[in-house]
Image (cartoon, grey):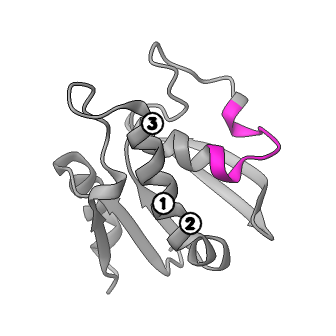
Amino acid sequence: PLNIDSLFSSDFYRCKETVKPFLEHRSLSVEYLKDLRERNPDKESHQSLNDRVKAWFEIEKTKLFTSNCIVIAHCGSCNMILEEIDTKHLPLYFKYEDEYHCHTPKAGFWHFLCDQGQIVNYQLITHPYK
């Protein structure tokens, strides 16, 4: 079983559905956040998405780097987080990319091992049903 200290999720329905299996056998609370929502291109600029995700990241980065956390979000939000923690450009230049230049495949998860705020190892874990 995973030893999870914190779980952050977008408050959109499909992320809430993704969270459910992590809660089945754990007494873990989830922080559902508007900051991790995907961008609505008709209502929000790319810069606005960037600003809100990076503001959230700045507030939570100590927790993210010093405990076992899960972040469940959308392509744009995940890419903003990757840009903050991927100074060596490991997963940002990972071989997977879709037509929208998203580095997080559908039904997939990134697992990162960080040391002193930097990614030292990573793995893309795809959904077992894919």
- Marked residue nearer the N-terminal end (2 or 3): 3
Please rate how many residues cluster around mark 3, counting C-alpha atoms within 10 Å: few if below 14, some from 14 to 19, many from 20. Answer: few
Point out the residue furthest to the top here.
Answer: 99
Residue closer to the observer: 18 or 88: 88
Q: Tell me, yes or no, whether the highlighted magenta stretch contains residue 84.
A: yes
| Left or right position of 95 against 35 | right
Please rate how many residues cluster around mark 1, counting C-alpha atoms within 10 Å: few if below 14, some from 14 to 19, many from 20. Answer: few
For the residues bearing labels 2 and 1, Cβ distance under 8 angstroms = yes
Residue 38, quarter of the rendered image: top left
Gap between marks 1 and 3 measured at Cα:
12 Å
Measuring from the top left, give residue 90's x and y in whole percent. 77, 39
Please rate how many residues cluster around mark 2, counting C-alpha atoms within 10 Å: few if below 14, some from 14 to 19, many from 20. Answer: few
Determine the secondary structure under disc 1.
Answer: helix
Q: Which stretch is magenta? A: 83-92
What residue is shown with label 2?
58
Res. 127 in view: no
Q: Amino acid at mark 2?
A: Glu
| Residue 47 - label | 3
Measuring from the top left, give residue 22's x and y in whole percent. 35, 67
Res. 8 in view: yes
Gap between marks 2 and 3 measured at Cα:
16 Å
Determine the secondary structure under disc 3.
Answer: helix
Q: Amino acid at mark 3?
A: Gln
The residue drawn where x is 66% and y is 56% is 112
Mark nearest the camera among 2 and 3 is 3
Q: Tell me, yes or no, whether the highlighted magenta stretch contains residue 57.
A: no
| Left or right position of 99 against 34 | right
Residue 89, quarter of the rendered image: top right
The residue drawn where x is 28% and y is 34% is 44
| Residue 18 - label | none
The residue drawn where x is 38% and y is 49% is 73
What residue is shown with label 1?
55
